[in-house]
Image (cartoon, helix red, strand yellow):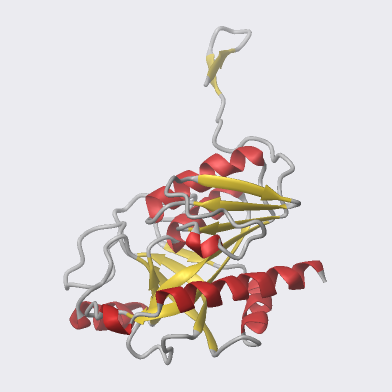
Amino acid sequence: MTDTGTDGNVIWQSLLRPEKKAGPKVMVVAATSQELGWVDPPPGLKPDFPLILEAGDTLFVVTGPGPANTALAIGRALAFGRPELILNVGIGGAYPGSALQIGDLAVATVEIDHDTGTEPKLPGGPPGSIGVPTSPGSAENLFAADRETTELLLESCKTLANCRKGAFVTSAMVTSSQERAERIAANYSAICENMEGAGAARAALYSGSKFVEVRAISNMVGPRDKEKWKIPEAIELAGQAAKAFLATLTS
C-alpha cells in the first residue's frame, strides 16, 4: 500500500504488522477435524479446511496437512484478532533414540523447518542457509516454543502418559526409511516428526503470539509399518492433553 506525502514523494506503508487487534486468548490448531474431536461441540468429520470455530475466548482452527496449509489457515484466523497463545495439537512420529514409544506424549521446545534452505550434503542432513532471512530477523529455521508455557504444558501432560520434551522437526515429506529417520534424529537431536508445527510456529512469530505444541505418538519414524500404528488412540490422547492444558490456563 502506498500514499503520497505533501512534498509529492511516495510514502510506503507496511500492512504486514498492523496494530494489534484484541482477539481470542488461545488459538488451538490441528491438521484434521478428527484431532479436534474433543471440542464441545466437535467440528465433525468435515473434509473442508480451513475450518474456524469460536468458543468463548478460544478459537479452534482445522488447518489441513502440511506447513503451508497451516500457516495459511492461521493467517486467515488472525482476522479475528491476535491470540495470546497458539497451541498446536495433534499426532506425530517418534524418532529413533528419542526414548518415546507409541502411546507417549511429546512437547516441543523448538520447531525445526526441515524443508527450507539449500539441499543438504547428506540425505536427511540439515538444509543449509540460503543467505537471506526466511522469517522475521533470522535466516535460521528454528522456532522456539515459549519456555514458561511449555513447562505448564509438560506438567499437565505428565498426568496422562509418559511425556518428554525436546526438538520437533517439521517435514512436508514424511520420513519412510530408517536411514533418513536416524540422520534427522542425529542432526537435530530431535524427538518427534510432524508436518505442521513449523508452519504454526512461523505464524505465531509473525503474529507476536506465544507458541506451544503437544503431540501424541502414533508411530515410530522410519519404515511405514501401518499395522503397528495407533492413530485413533493417539488422537484421543492428544485431545486429552490439550483439554488438560487448557484447564490449567483457566484454573
At horizontal 47% and vertical 85% (from top left) the residue drawn is 103
Instruction: Using the rendered view, name the quadrant where residue 247 is placed.
Output: bottom right
Q: In the rendered view, would you say 184 is above or below 57?
A: below
The percent coordinates of residue 106 (x first, y second) are 50, 80
Q: From where the camera sits, is residue 191 visible?
A: no
Q: Residue furthest right?
A: 251
The percent coordinates of residue 238 (x first, y second) are 54, 73
At horizontal 67% and vertical 81% (from top left) the residue drawn is 156
Q: From where the camera sits, is residue 88 visible?
A: yes
The percent coordinates of residue 237 (x first, y second) are 54, 77
Report the number of numbered marks.
0
Indicate the quadrant containing the C terminus: top left, top right, bottom left or bottom right.
bottom right
At horizontal 67% and vertical 59% (from top left) the residue drawn is 40
Q: Is residue 113 left or right of residue 210?
A: left
Q: Out of 235 and 82, give the one closest to the viewer.
A: 235
Q: Out of 144 and 247, give the one closest to the viewer.
A: 247
At horizontal 52% and vertical 21% (from top left) the residue drawn is 1
